Image: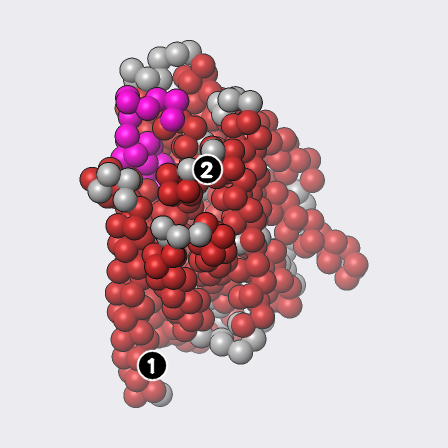
Amino acid sequence: MGKGKTKDTQNLIIFLCWCVYASAYFGRYSYSSSINSISQHYEGIINNADAGLVATFFFVAYGAGQIINGFLCKKYSSRWTFPIALGSSAFINLCVFIFMKSGYLGNLFFLLKYLWALNGAAQSMIWSSIIFVFGKNIETKNISRSGFIISTSVPAGTFIAYGTSYIMALFDLYEWSFVLAAAIMVAVAVMWLLLFEPHQRTDIPVQETSKDNKNAKRQSFSHVALITVSGLAILAVSGSFVKDGLQNWIPTILKKTYSFTDADALILATSIYFLGALGALLVRFINKYIKDNILLALTFYSFVSVFVLLIIKLLKKSSIPVVIFFALVMIGNYAINCIITSIAPLNLRSYMNPGLAAGLLDGFCYAGSAISTYLLGFVADRSNNNWSAVLNLLLAVSVCTIVIVAIFEIITRKRTKTDD
C-alpha cells in the first residue's frame, strides 16, 4: 500500500471514529439535554433527584461496561462492534420516545432509569474499541493528531444534543430529540459498515515482539502504566463528578438563579458546551511543555477549581460573568477528559493494550458521573434549590482531589528516582 493510500485510509478511520463517538454522545445526552423540559413537564410528580437518577443509572451501567469491554475489546470485530452498539442505543432511544408519547411516563417514571441503563451498557462497547482501533491502525506519527481529533467529538456530540434540545424546547417537542438521536446513530452505523477499511500499522518495531522486550514491558507496566493509571483514575472520578454534574445541571442553575426561560438556559448551556472543544486544543498546545499526563491534568484541574470558586462568589449577582466562568470551567473539564481518556491511553500503548487503558480510565470517569448526577440533584432538593450549596460541594471535591493527587505525584516521582 502506497504512502498516499496509507494516509488516506488512516484519515478515513479517524473521521469514521469521530462520527461514531459524536453520534453516540448525542444518543447518551438526549436525556440529559432534555432534563429541564422533562422536570418541568412532570413537575409535582418527580423532583431533581428523580430526574438525575435516570442519568445516574446510565453512568453506572456505562462505567461498569467500560471496564469489562476494556478487557474484551481486542477480541471484538472492528467492523461490527460500532454498528451493533449504535444500533442498540438507537433502538433504546426510540423506546424512550414511545414511552413518553404513550402518556404513561408520569406513573411509570421509575422504569425509565432501567431502560436508560441498557443504553449505557450498549454504549460502553464504543470508547475502548475506538482507542484499540487507533492503537492497531494509526501509525505513531499520527497518534497525537488522532487523539486530539477524537477528543473533539465529545463537545461536538454534546453541542448537537443540547442544540437539538434547544430547538425542540422552542416548540415543546423535547421527546423528538430521542428520535433524531436514533436516526443519526443508525446513519453513522451504516456509514461505518460501508466505508471502514482496516489498516495494519507498519511502524511496529521488531523488538516489541521479542521475549526480552516482553519481559521489559512487564517491568515497565509496573512502573509506568500502573502509576499513570492509578493517578489518573483519581482525577477521572473527581473530574467527571464536576464535569458531568455541571453539564447536567447548568441549564437548571441558570433558569432557577436568573429566571431564564428553558430555551434561553439551553442556548447558553449549548454555547458553553461548544466552547469545550477549546479544551482539546489547549491540551495539545500545553502538552508540548508538560509531558507528564498526571501533572498536565492536575494543572487544568487547578484552574477549574479557581473558576468554580469565582462562580460561587458571583452566582447571585450578574449572569454575564457567571456564564463566562461556566464556559472556562467546561473548557478545563473537557481538557482533563481529553488527557484521561485519549492522550494517556494512546501514550501507554507501548506498555499495555490502549483499549484496556481507555476502558479502565473511562470507567472511572463514569463512576464519578454516576455519583454526581443524583447527588447534586439530591443536594439541590434538600437545600430548596440552593445551587450555591451544590457548587460548594463541587469546589470541596476539586480541592481535596488536587491535594491528594499532588501528594501522590510527589511520592511516586521520588520512588521512581530511587528505583532508577
The span shown in magenta is: 40-59
Q: Main secondary structure of the magenta part?
A: helix
Residue 47, image x, y percentages:
28, 30
Q: Amino acid at mark 2?
A: Phe
* Image quadrant assignment for residue 8: bottom right
- Answer whether residue 289 is magenta in the image: no
Q: Is residue 199 above or below residue 97?
A: below
The three-letter amino acid code for the residue at tag 1 is: Arg
Q: Which residue is mark 1?
A: 413
Q: Nearer the viewer, residue 92 or 266?
A: 266
List x then y, in percent, for residue 67.
Answer: 36, 49
Q: Locate the C terminus by quadrant.
A: bottom left
| Residue at position x 36%, y 50% in the image | 316
Residue nearest the observer in this picture, 219 or 296: 296
**Residue pointed to by mark 2:** 260
Observer-nearest of 42 and 258: 258
Disc 1 is placed on an element classified as: helix
| Mark 2, other Cα within 10 Å: few <14 / some 14–19 / many ≥20 | some
Residue 198 visible, this orientation? no
